[in-house]
Image (tube, grey):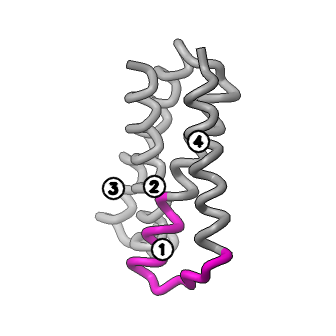
Amino acid sequence: MAWYLLLAAGLFEVAWAIGLEYSEGLTKPIPTAGTVLALIASMLLLAKAVEELPVGTAYAVWTGIGAVGTTLLGIALFDEPATSSRLAFIGVIVVGIVGLHSVSA
């Protein structure tokens, strides 16, 4: 169950990171509210996951999910560059996430 909570926490991390762009520096009330709610949900889910998972593993996976998801959405939504080297390094992060999951007790 902790891994599902961690996955959800990571997805909420992507949501709040993307929300920062839409909130335009936290100046737009509705996107700012969504960003803050996603941030709170992400933290609460991460805290719950850490009750069962090692904090180092959970934090690395949480930030990895956030980095991968935010980068891919940045490419899709904001025309950020999608170079082969950038995508390859995102792949390395994915390998790290899967590796941490596979070696966790």
Separation of residues labelled 3 and 2 (CA atoms): 12 Å
- Work out whether 74 lies above or below 45: below
Indicate which disc residue 97 carries.
4
Residue type, label 2: Val
* 89 to the left or right of 37: right
Residue type, label 4: Ile
Q: Say which residue label 1 marks.
A: 74
Disc 1: CA contacts within 10 A as few (<14), some (14-19) or many (>=20): some
Q: Say which residue label 3 marks.
A: 34
* Spot occupied by residue 45 in the image (x, y as percentages of width and height): 43, 30
Q: Residue at x 51, y 72 (%)?
A: 25
Q: Within the image, what quadrant is residue 98 found in? A: top right
Indicate which disc residue 14 carries.
2
- Work out whether 40 lies above or below 35: above
Q: Residue at x 67, y 64 (%)?
A: 89
Label 4 sits on a secondary structure element that is helix
